[in-house]
Amino acid sequence: MTETKAKKTFRIGFKVVIYIVCIILGIMSILPFIIMFVNATRSSVQIQQQALSLVPSNFLADNMRALSRGRTFNAIVGFRNSMIISSGATICATYFSCLTAYALTAYDWRFRKSVFTFIVAVMMIPGQLSAIGFVQFMYNINMVNNFLPFILPAIAAPPIVFFMRQYLLSTFSLDIVNAARIDGSHEFRTFNFIVLPMMKPAIAMQAIFVFVGTWNQLLMPMILLTDVRLYTMPIMVRQLSGNLYNTNFGSVYLGLSMSVLPLFIVYFSLSKYIIAGVQLGGVKE
């Protein structure tokens, strides 16, 4: 009896420690965003004197006016451009990666293993190695000041293909495809109306990563987009920063806060599919 009580006490203590650690990690994850939103309501002098503060101030309207006076900052234009690029890249990356993963899983063709090996090998090549050549190629074909260089390359996304293939191998049954073929369904119809809905959790997870990564791109858009009307939100926020003596830090934090709001919306709108996928994977039949 004493040993049983000791085990129960140990389990309770272990759970308490886990909860405490999770709470601390959650606070550490949320704290930078809280500080950013609070600093958006403070003046530049207040931020320079005390960078870390959890108490909002009353300079939000002044920071908004400072943003509106910026020559290159236009929130509506920035949101529109970033949304076009991020949405287009997300759709291309997720759809064509699912299509490639489906071809590597559902069909038995000669070079299937070789193609998958090549995709895995491409994953090991750092993206920085191809950046200079990509920029030169875009300039040679006159694709400067165009959104397509940021959307079309997303079609080839080896990490997403790898993830989607592993997801299909663990959750997908070819009997469903064979049944659809017997019923007279075409291959693309089977993929679009049967396979894709089954991949919603994986698509949602990868869509979040692609959207956030594309939205936060700064270096490549700054090189290829020279027209102010095509600037994305990160570029506009970057233009707010001057030097240490003439930067309005309050307006910079306000611009950053406005820039991350769509990321929260995308995450919370897609997170339910991720949770559903985790719950589905945890059910044993």
Image (cartoon, grey):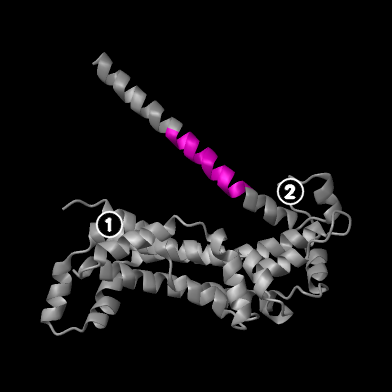
Q: How far apart are marks 2 and 1 (CA)?
A: 42 Å
- Prevailing SS of the magenta stretch: helix
Tally of numbered tags: 2
Residue density around tag 2, few if under 14, some if 14–19, many if 20 or more, within 10 Å = few
> In the current view of this chain or complex, which residue is farthest to the top?
2
Q: Which of 265 and 183 is in front in this view?
A: 183
Q: Position of residue 273 (x, y in %)?
A: 37, 63
Amino acid type of the residue tagged 1 in the rendering = Leu
Residue 15, compared with residue 256, is above or below; it is above
Q: Is residue 26 one of those drawn in magenta?
A: yes
| N-term mark: 2 or 1 | 2
The image quadrant where one finds the N terminus is top left
Q: In this view, does 76 lie to the left or right of 206?
A: right
- Quarter-of-image position of residue 272: bottom left
- Whether residue 88 is visible here, answered yes or no, is no
Q: Residue at x 64, y 71 (%)?
A: 221
Q: Give the range drawn in magenta.
A: 18-31
Where does label 1 land, which residue?
Answer: 280
Amino acid type of the residue tagged 2 in the rendering = Val
Q: Nearer the viewer, residue 273 or 160?
A: 160
